[in-house]
Amino acid sequence: MQNPLTAGSSIVRNSIILGVFAMVTVGLIALTQQGTASRIAEEQRRMQMSALNEILPHDQHDNDLLEDAFAINNRELLNLPGDAMAYRGKLDGEVVAVILPTIAPDGYSGRIDLLVGVRANGEIAGVRITNHRETPGLGDKVQLNKSTWVLDFNGTSLSMPAPENWGVRKDGGDFDQFTGATITPRAVVQAVYRALQYFEANRDQLLELNNKEPARG
């Protein structure tokens, strides 16, 4: 028959070992999650910086875009869930373009995050997709590394094409859809158009050099 003291000691020892094991496991999981979150955040930042430089190349501005970042928050047109960063491009001290964050909430697989560059005259400087979950080989053609479709926005504005033509060809608009995928380009086209509407409604504030306050609405 086992000594009760010995049995008690064994139970305590095993409990301690299990407790330590559990704490180590939880710690490792937390570290893994933290490391993964950091890598994801860094990758998203890298993609965003790449998109900024593609939308407004260095020869079109002489300032640090990150230094001229400012917060905006708009749910009605940009569909932003909270404050997000926008960027001003300057040349010889004058604001020549604003790069706006916007979200297309109605992609085929959910929300699509975009950056829309708008020149001071209201024309699109460029559009880039920064995050999405669209179907590979179909909806992911909104990415520049998959197709040149997104370049069709360059030089467009609220009046060119006419408002009724801001849609995909299937809906009577001027923009191509993808073979086998209409929902994704439709969502992006409408998100870009809403960004232009937001720019027009807030033009003076967005082009103000010293304005650092979020635009609300």
Image (spheres, helix red, strand yellow):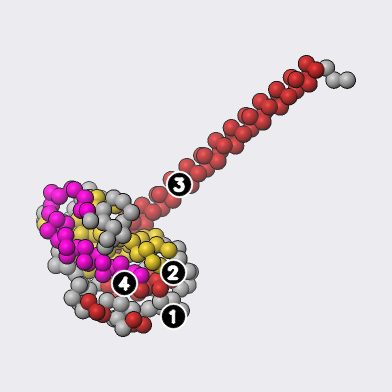
Single out the mark in the foreground, 3 or 2. Answer: 2
Query: In this image, 63 relative to 84: left or right?
Result: left
Which label number is shown at residue 179? 1
Q: Disc 4 marks which amino acid?
A: Val
Residue 76 % position (x, y): 27, 61
The percent position of residue 170, horizontal first and vertical second, equals: 36, 82
> Which residue is tagged 4?
189
- Dot 1 crowding, Cα within 10 Å, few <14, some 14–19, many 20+: few
Local secondary structure at mark 2: loop
Q: Residue at x 20, y 59 (%)?
A: 98
Instruction: Please tell me whether mark 4 sits on a helix, a strand or a loop.
Output: helix
C-alpha gap between disc 4 and disc 1: 16 Å
Badge 2 is on which residue? Answer: 108
Distance in Å between CA atoms under marks 1 and 2: 14 Å
Bounds of the magenta span?
Answer: 187-216
Q: Position of residue 54 (x, y in %)?
A: 29, 63
The overriding secondary structure of the stretch rendered in magenta is: helix
Q: Considering only order in the chain, which callout, 2 or 1, is on the residue closer to the N terminus? A: 2
